[in-house]
Image (tube, rainbow, N blue to C red):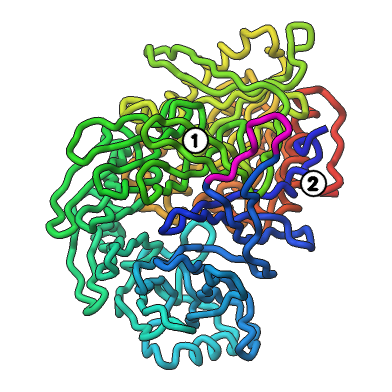
Amino acid sequence: MTAFHDIRDYVAIPRVLSLKLSPDGSRLVSAVQSLNPDGKSYGTALWAVTPDGEPGSEPGSGPSGEPYRLTRSAKGETQAVFTASGDLLFTSARPDPTAKDDGDETPALWLLPRQGGEARQVASRPGGIGAVRTAGDVVVFASDVLDGDEADEEERRKARKDAGISAILHEGYPVRYWDHDLGPGRTRLFTGRLGADRLEDVRELTPEPGEALREAAFELTPDGRTVITTWRVPLSAGQSRIDLVAVDVATGERRTLLSEEGHDFGGPLAVSPDGTRLACSRERHTDLDVSARVELWIADVATGEGGPHAGDLFPMDVAWAPDSSAVYLVADFRGRRPVFRVTPGGGEAVRLTQDDASYLGLNVSPDGRTVYALRSGIALAPAPARVDAGTGEVTDLLSPVPRPEVRGTLTEITATADDGAEIRGWLVLPEGASAESPAPFLLWIHGGPVASWNDWQWRWQSWIMAEHGYAVLMPDPCLSTGYGQDMIDRGWGDWGPRTQADLDAIVDVALARDDIDAERIGAMGGSFGGYMANWIAGHSDRYRAIVTHASLWNLDQFAGTTDASAYWQREFGAPGSDRYARLSPHRALDKISTPMLVIHGDKDYRVPIGEALRLWWDLRRSEVESKFLYFPDENHWILKPGNAVAWYETVLAFLAQHVLGQEWKRPDSVA
């Protein structure tokens, strides 16, 4: 038995979430998520990781530099950043022992001294403190602020709460984002200087920004003089554009750094150590005939002059070499996410890591010889690693928590689509699968749609399915990243038909194997993968069961109720246009005969619950054998441990009934 057999054991596995390197290169810090004592929720804590701590290579030798826990609180800690002197700043809603406990649970800013001892609260705001950046003794942070006089904001928040007012009056778009409502406050940036005990001279940098800083990404230049931040610019008809602006920390003066019609500039952001250049992303606005494209953009901080780098690589994370001579980035690439090196103005990106892993959380050592990152993969949970910047050699570091061991095998397969394109994917095979004992088969379709199966998934965990005997195919069809712009162009505006053709081609290859049972097969997917599960249900009868999570059903309805209607309207056109009719899965309701399990969370604002309610009613009135697993308190993802147990146990029971031919047994978790 492994932790993937009993879902309760699986959700209890601790998870490494982040990695930060101290300015002198002597310490790494990771945020680790684990079950709270009540077993009903997760909490986070900060752990110290030694940059050279690795298991001994000699037989019988022990590890050196064991990771150790830095923080302990019921509320947890996030947003860790090092100060120039090596102290650690983080945000937490833990109570301040030096102040009266008023029951407030908004995150404040805390400082943990390098030499050890108790953490102390150094700043707080009525609307809490979000992302934090620091350079020298300068600190910049984001906070949610109500419109009006800042002096009485705390009283106004309390009055609103005491009066039982939750109403929000909107005068613009958007009004929601992923899983939370926007307003009544708006994001603003503040700055202060680290003093002996508190953050001193705290003042606002961006008064009355309106909606410009919603979900902002920002960085502080190494000299602490300038903040570079995204700035949302409203356009006509509910559209918007995202610029990058530079804000002078001393005066608050703002100038536009990067702005281009039809493009958004944003994260990941990184300012070169010499303060002269900025690495960021530039994403073009799509339309009916223009597909999604994201580029690494490097620009001069003083003039804004710059250009694209790294070709078709979509940047996921960036970090500068300490001498400002190169940028390291990670980007999806053929089912992996390697580290690349890019020389500004120097041509193509050079791949540094050559393994099958995926990397995030880049940190470059002060001497430029090492890149630290979280290393993971389809069969590898995230953990700290170091990469030799010269050779690309990778060494795993001692992790705050052990990686879970997977049982089974991971292999790569490819197929040729009907238009000649190569389609590749990962195939997870359960232990013992063979010609004598072929495994039942699951097609698992990724979300996005502009995405890729290339990393460990805590939510969409194929190894749980493998532990229960299934072979799981995770393909990258059209619209997947890491295969060049042509792969995205192939599926643009042709979601269902083109994607299904790609999936059919690679499924055929998988089912031709003698260690897979070509008769006992199912399909499942979430988000765009759920859209494709719905599409396949109405356009194929090859699967015995289909699981559809957080799925798009009626495209016209979805595009007008999602949290980002303007984005989807660019690809689909105005409401009621031909593309909605041609690509909407609900149009093929009368062709659906495959049993379906519908899953949705009520707090999902990206794919609103109305999609599942409409799908469920359509299946009911059409008498399609189906079930509806509903989560009143979850969003696009099912995040609470108990609900994750219910999700997997219900999916497994549904598949056991229809794919394996077993008698239906209602899981205890939903009894």
Horizontal and vertical percent for residue 94?
A: 63, 75
Q: Which residues are magenta?
A: 52-61
Say whether disc 2 or disc 1 marks the residue closer to the N-terminus.
Answer: 2
Horizontal and vertical percent for residue 168?
A: 47, 76
* Residue in the image at 38% along x and 73% along y: 139
Residue 482 sits in quarter: top left
Task: Give the CA distance from mark 2 to mark 1.
Answer: 27 Å
Amino acid on which the number 2 mark rests in the picture: Arg
Horizontal and vertical percent for residue 251?
A: 22, 79
Q: Main secondary structure of the magenta part?
A: loop
**In the image, which disc is placed on residue 8?**
2
* Residue in the image at 62% along x and 49% along y: 65
Depth check, front residue: 562 or 637: 637
Depth check, front residue: 332 or 505: 332
| Mark 1 neighbour density, 10 Å: few (under 14) some (14–19) many (20 or more) | many
* Residue in the image at 51% along x and 77% along y: 167
Q: Secondary structure at mark 2?
A: helix
Instruction: Give the residue at mark 1.
Output: 358
Can the viewer see residue 184? Answer: yes
